[in-house]
Image (cartoon, grey):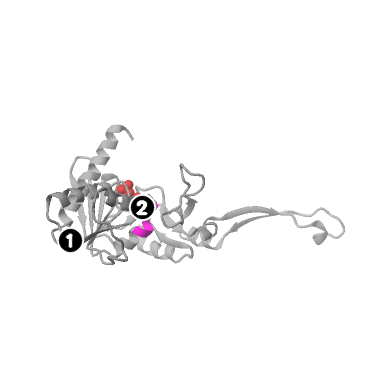
Amino acid sequence: MSANNDQLVAEAKRKASYAAINEHVTADTKVIGIGSGSTVVFCVERLAQRMKSESLSLQACIPTSFQAKQLIIEAGLPLSELNQHPTIDVAFDGADEVDTSLNCIKGGGACQLQEKLVASCAKKFVIVADYRKDSTVLGQQWKNGVPLEVIPMAYVSILEVAYGTIHPPHYLLFPNGAPSPTYHYTFFSTHFQKLKALGGKPTLRMATRKAGPVVTDNGNFVIDADFGNIKDPVALEKDLISIPGIVETGLFCNMATWAYFGMDNGEVKTRKL
Ligand SMILES: O=C[C@H](O)[C@H](O)[C@H](O)COP(=O)(O)O
């Protein structure tokens, strides 16, 4: 992306975030969920501005990641946690892709577990995004797959396709000393077979400035599973979460009721249910 394009996208994120905070944070809003990623940075920025200039009754901001926690602290906003405030007035979060029914793919930054928990405890879940995330069918724009948070103990069972060769000891087969045949096999692990049956192609997300896999804020790994265009995200989310070892999926279905997209012409497009 060129520097100009970077600026355009950043401006789109800022405009969407400012519009969402302006419209959904009122004088009565007490508890806010703060999502993760590069777009919510602008939500926090706008919230901090409004806290200084208006008399808001905000009591607590609930983070969805290490990053969100740092943002809240640095902005001087009231930090709390879900266990202290299990009911959230409104949660704001970014998305990797949003379809026409406001179903989303999230987890490009590996934060989907805490994000889904916070969003599910919110009376209202508002998405903020730039124009590249606006889609009709999930999988059309976001080509990195659905992020699945998996416990480390389970990752091989979800990923593994083993190819091998068996050379049985010849004396077992041919006691007369004839040469033994070799057998080639392909082994699909149980959970991989389920994922494959759903049309998924899984890869373990590797870290870039650390040797080994990405490790989430919860100590888990992320498997990105590519399903192409997702016709029925609701069914897919249910099927995926039923696979043992998958702690959370990046499919957020029937959760958001509002989305704000910053467009490349400087306008903000709103979609609501
Ligand atoms: O894990 C990360 C989150 O789901 C983000 O909200 C999502 O990836 C969108 O991030 P960004 O606002 O940076 O595009």
Residue beneath label 2, please?
Answer: 66
Three-letter amino acid code of the residue under disc 2: Phe
Three-letter amino acid code of the residue under disc 1: Thr
Which secondary structure, mark 2? helix
Q: Nearer the viewer, residue 187 or 70?
A: 70
Left or right: 168 in relation to 147: right
The kind of secondary structure the magenta stretch mainly shows is helix
Residue beneath label 1, please?
Answer: 29
Within 10 Å of disc 1 (Cα), the crowding (few <14, some 14-19, many 20+) is some
Left or right: 228 in relation to 163: left
Provide residue 16's location: percent of width, then percent of height: 21, 48
Mark 1 residue CB less than 8 A from any atom of ligand 1: no
Provide residue 229's location: percent of width, then percent of height: 38, 53
Provide residue 223's location: percent of width, then percent of height: 46, 54
Disc on the earlier residue, 2 or 1: 1
Which quadrant holds the C terminus? bottom left
Within 10 Å of disc 2 (Cα), the crowding (few <14, some 14-19, many 20+) is few
Identify the disc placed on residue 54.
none
Which quadrant holds the N terminus? top left
Which secondary structure, mark 1? loop
Check whether the beta carbons of the residues at disc 2 and disc 1 lie within 8 A of each other: no
User: For the point 56% across and 55% down, which residue is it?
Assistant: 160
What's the magenta region?
Answer: 110-114
Give yes or no for residue 270 being in the magenta stretch. no
